[in-house]
Image (spheres, rainbow, N blue to C red):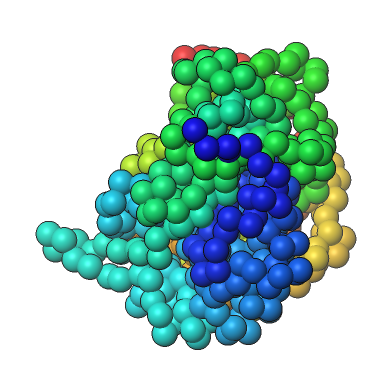
Amino acid sequence: MKRKIVSAAEAAAKIPDGAVVAMSGVGIYDGIAQEVIDAVVARYEQEQHPSGISLVHSGGNMVANAFSKEGMLSAYYSGLPMIESDILTANTYPAYSLTQGIVQHLYRGQASDTPYVTKIGLGTFIDPRIEAGAINALATENPIVKLIVIDDEEYLYYKIPPITVSIIRATTADADGNLTSEQEVMKNELLYMAMAARNNGGIVIAQVKYIAETGSLKAADVKVPGMLVDYVVSCTNHDKLHGPPMNAPFSLGMTGYHRVPDYMVPLKLYAPDGDRLLAARRAVTELRPGCVANVGIGMGEGVSYLASKEGLKDMFYLTNELGAVSGHIGGKFFFGSSFNAYAYMNHPEMFDFINGHGLDMSFLGAAEIGEDGSVNVTKINGKIKGSGGFVNISSSTPKIVFLSSFTIGGKNVIENGELKIIEPGRGGKFLKSVDQISFSGPDAAKRGQEILYITERAVFKLIDGKVTLIEYASGLDVQKDILGFMDFVPAISPDLKTMPAYCFEGGPIGLKEEWKKQL
């Protein structure tokens, strides 16, 4: 049996020039093998090896920028690009912006030697008839997405180079390399990553917190069997190099292995305020008892906060795309986690569920909203932001609630139950056309999706392919305070009414008792 437990520097030395390197993790720390990554970058700084590697990651892995040293990368594939936008658009190497779910399923495709074909991405910036997910000219010249037709239906075929190195993270390993994840907050795509690298003749490097005696781990708890793991690095600094999501305070209640009292859930740390809270108060009423809903990063997080704050969380199933099911779904730097979750699905499996139309509704942010109902969240002011799970979720869910502030830089207060505008802000949210199509309004209309756009000033709905004003905040002048800040004239519902009073009241919305009657 070969020696598997090595130092981070020894593991980094095993990565050859030209390797296709996949790394697990989301955010600043969670699931990221930080000590191994640091060692790989340090080796390159000292030796200029490994050079010319291709980097792959599914979620917003914020250490990706460390690989942006001259000559280190030859290609970049990401579900949520984290290398600085100016570097990616400089056209030094081909760079591609895909989605979180697509990259995970590309891992699975390589693990099982199966082509990846899906409808995810059609009509968006990933569609080869639009931008093909290309960030720069080199990527445009070397496309990795093709349009194909099967039984008269359109699909997209995705292909990236074979992964030859997977750098993953778990909690405990034994000397044979069997891995468990009992203190990991997110249940990442470790097994598919490991199988992909090994099946491509490559290597798997795992960073862990603890080393256990061989054979002492419960077989049912093993997430990746040792036969797939080549090298194990025992982290030397847990707090700095093996931390929780976004460097947030760690709680065992986030792992799925322990429950904590509700008073220990730090709701105040991810409470929305201002326009975010007003929009969330309107949005949460779209939930229905027993429904299954996704809560996206950003303004959508206010829905999960209110569900916990008002004791509603057990009346439906809130989820996030990282795999958490119910509990107190986290927001801000806790995003991706859940305190006292009912269950955790593995990351790729959650996207199977999402892609398969398993959700009833989803709450997502919106940076730009176009006249045709399209939404942009992936390219703002020319900067590449990427999709994460947005494209998968928005194109696969029957009902989408987009949340946004109405203007940029506005300031509002509540007086006597009405919205008062202190600083109107400027336009730029409701445009004739969006800068990049992350969600296609026309395609949504064809699919028959129900689409709402909720802001603190007004609520719009996509009706017959038209963005239609259906509600406005009491105390506002529709022409002056709403239409005057839009670059297009929306349709106006014949049943136009004011937004519900509870949006602008400070007390509980009071949905729990009402919904109990429906159960």
Look at the picture and state if 90 lies above or below 489.
below
Residue 513 in view: yes
Residue 321 in view: no
Residue 251 percent coordinates (x, y):
76, 26
* Residue displayed at 66% across by 42% down: 6
* Residue displayed at 60% across by 72% down: 51
386 with respect to 298 (left or right): left
Residue located farthest toward the left when viewing the structure as drawn: 151
Image quadrant of residue 399? top left
Look at the picture and state if 4 lies above or below 214.
below
Residue 376 percent coordinates (x, y):
55, 66
Look at the picture and state if 341 lies above or below 475.
above
Residue 514 percent coordinates (x, y):
57, 20
Q: How many marks?
A: 0
Q: Nearer the viewer, residue 155 or 258?
A: 258
513 with respect to 29 (left or right): left
330 with respect to 133 (left or right): right
Q: Nearer the viewer, residue 433 or 354?
A: 354
Image quadrant of residue 246? top right
Q: Nearer the viewer, residue 405 or 155?
A: 155
Image quadrant of residue 127? bottom left
Residue located farthest toward the front when viewing the structure as drawn: 1
Q: Nearer the viewer, residue 433 or 174?
A: 174
Residue 327 percent coordinates (x, y):
62, 24
81 with respect to 153 (left or right): right
* Residue displayed at 71% across by 52% down: 9
* Residue displayed at 66% across by 16% down: 258
